[in-house]
Image (cartoon, rainbow, N blue to C red):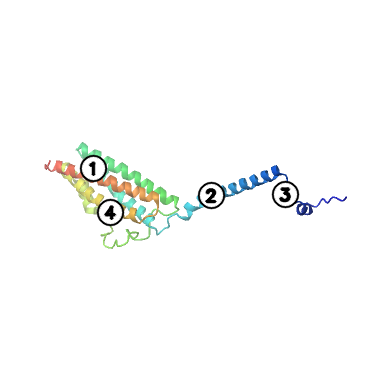
Amino acid sequence: MTTSTDAGTAAEAADPEDVPAPARGRRNWLLVIAALLVGTLLGFGIGFVAPRLSTPGDNSVEAGFLRDMAVHHAQAVEMSMIVHQKSDDPEIVYLASDIALTQHGQIGYMQAWLRDWHLSLTSTQQPMAWMPDSAGSVVNGLMPGMATPEQLADLRNATGKELNVEYLTLMRQHHLGGIHMAQEAVKLSHNSDVKWLAGTMVTSQQGEITVIDNLLKKIQGKQ
C-alpha cells in the first residue's frame, strides 16, 4: 500500500467526519478565539482613529468658540487683577480673585484643546464668525460684553467706591456677553468636552451675576 505525504492530497482524502470529536472541538474554539481577537483589535483601531476623524477643524464652531472665549476671558482676568490689587473691599477682592483664577484655568483648558487638535490659538477669521446670525455682535472689534479701552483706563485710575462699582458694573456686562456666547456653543457644538466647558461657564457666571447684583446693592446703599 502506498501512503502519500502530500498535504493537499491528505486534506482532500480526509472527511471532516473522520476527524475525532475532540480535535473538531479544539478547532472550533480556536476559530472563535481568533474571531474575538480580530474583533477586539478592530475595536481598538476604531477607538483610536475615531476621535481623530472627528477632531474639530480650523473653521469649526469649537475652534472659533475656544479662540474667542479665550480672548474674552483674558479681559475678565485683567480687570479682576486690577481690582484685586486696588480694592479695599474684602468681598470684592474675593470675587475678583475667584473670577481671575476660574477664567485663567478655563483659558488653559481651551488652549490645550486647540493644541491637541493641532490648531492655531488665533484665527484669521473675524471674531464670532463661528456663530450664525452674529452680525452686529462685534462692535469696534469687541465681542459681547467686553469693556472698551476707555473703560479699562477708567478702571485702572479709579479708587475706593468708584473702583468697586465700576468693576462690578463692567464685570456684570462682561458675564452677560460671555453667557450668550457659551449658550450658543452648547447649542451648536458636537464636541462633548466643549459643550461641558461652555455649560460650566453659563452656570458659574449666572451665579456670579447674582453675587454682583447683591454687592452693587450693598455698596450703593440699597440693602
- Depth check, front residue: 76 or 4: 4
Task: For marks 2 and 1, give the CA distance.
Answer: 53 Å
Q: Which mark is residue 83?
A: 1
- Depth check, front residue: 72 or 132: 132
Q: Which of the two discs, 2 and 1, labels the residue nearer the N terminus?
A: 2
- Depth check, front residue: 21 or 132: 21
Q: Which of the two discs, 1 and 4, labels the residue nearer the N terminus?
A: 1
Task: Give the residue number, with chain letter if any, for mark 2.
Answer: 43
Q: Which of the two discs, 1 and 3, labels the residue nearer the N terminus?
A: 3
Specify whether residue 22 is in view: yes
Mark 4 vs 2: CB contact within 8 A: no
- Secondary structure at numbered mark 4: helix
Identify the residue shown where x is 48% and y is 55%: 53
* Residue 180 image point, x, y percent: 28, 54
- Secondary structure at numbered mark 3: helix
Specify whether residue 78 is in view: no
Q: Nearer the viewer, mark 2 or mark 1?
A: 2
Q: Which mark is residue 31?
A: none
Task: Give the residue number, with chain letter if any, for mark 3.
Answer: 17
Task: For marks 4 and 2, give the CA distance.
Answer: 39 Å
* Residue 37 image point, x, y percent: 59, 47
At label 1, counting other C-alpha atoms closer than 10 Å, the crowd grade (few under 14, some 14-19, many 20 or more) is many
Q: Nearer the viewer, mark 3 or mark 2?
A: 3
Q: Nearer the viewer, mark 4 or mark 3?
A: 3
Mark 1 vs 4: CB contact within 8 A: no
Residue type, label 1: Val
Residue type, label 4: His
Identify the residue shown where x is 57% and y is 49%: 39
Residue 124's place in the image compared with 216, above or below, is below
Q: Which mark is residue 180?
A: 4
Which image quarter holds the C terminus? top left
